Amino acid sequence: MIAISISILFLLSSCGNNTKNESEDKVTEEQVVTEQPITVGDNKDAKLSEILLVSGDAMKFDKKEIRVKSGQTVKLTLKHSGTMPKSAMGHNFVLLKNSISLTDFGTAAAQSKVPDYGIPAELLKDVIAHTKMIGGGETDVIEFPAPEKGTYEFLCSFPGHYGMMKGKFIVE
Ligand code: CU
């Protein structure tokens, strides 16, 4: 009876320890990570990293940071979950080469004369990948090879949006 009690106690205490360690680990992880949600592809080692980026009737992406692995193909889905038309609240995803200033690009793109505020032809050289401009209820999917390791910036180039709609695209 004593032996059983001891082993139960031991089990309980070791379970307790495990749980404690886990929660400590979680806390540490959360402290390191920024307060913004982070998207990692479902399988970090997969050849394909699938990213879902959602926007709506506000000037906001649901992610401030996207992480992929070098060598992966990135399949990015941009979804507009709102109802406003693209003429009023259009969104796109534009990934910039890392030598390009997001503010300069956003300012220049706002002068776009391309229909639906498409990216002006002269700015395409600054872009690694981009979706089309979409409105409420629409989705666009693009695939591109992850650029070399580094931190890049992405934005929505609809006039006036890049101040709010931007984030880091990190290739590890
Ligand atoms: Cu936008």
Image (tube, grey):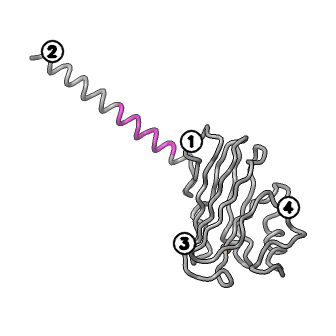
Q: Which residue is mark 3?
A: 81
Mark with earlier residue (3, 4): 3
- Residue at the location (45% across, 42% down)? 26
Q: Which residue is mark 1?
A: 43
Mark with earlier residue (1, 3): 1
Q: Which residue is mark 4?
A: 126
Q: In the structure shown, which secondary structural element does the residue marked by tag 1 occupy? A: loop
Mark with earlier residue (2, 1): 2
Q: Which residues are magenta?
A: 18-29
Q: Find residue 35 and report its horizontal and vertical position in percent.
A: 54, 56
Q: Amino acid at mark 2?
A: Ala
Q: Which mark is residue 133?
A: none
- Residue at the location (73% across, 52% down)? 144
10 part of magenta stretch: no
Which callout, 4 or 1, points to the residue nearer the camera? 1
Q: Amino acid at mark 3?
A: Ser
Q: CA distance from mark 1 to mark 3?
A: 25 Å
Mark with earlier residue (3, 2): 2
User: Which one is nearer the viewer's eye here, 5 or 140?
Assistant: 140
> Callout 4 environment at 10 Å: few (<14), some (14 to 19), or many (20+)?
some
**In the rendered image, which quarter is residue 94 located in?**
bottom right
**In the rendered image, which quarter is residue 46 located in?**
top right
Q: Which residue is mark 2?
A: 3
Which callout, 3 or 4, points to the residue nearer the camera? 3
Mark 4 close to ligand 1, CB under 8 Å: no
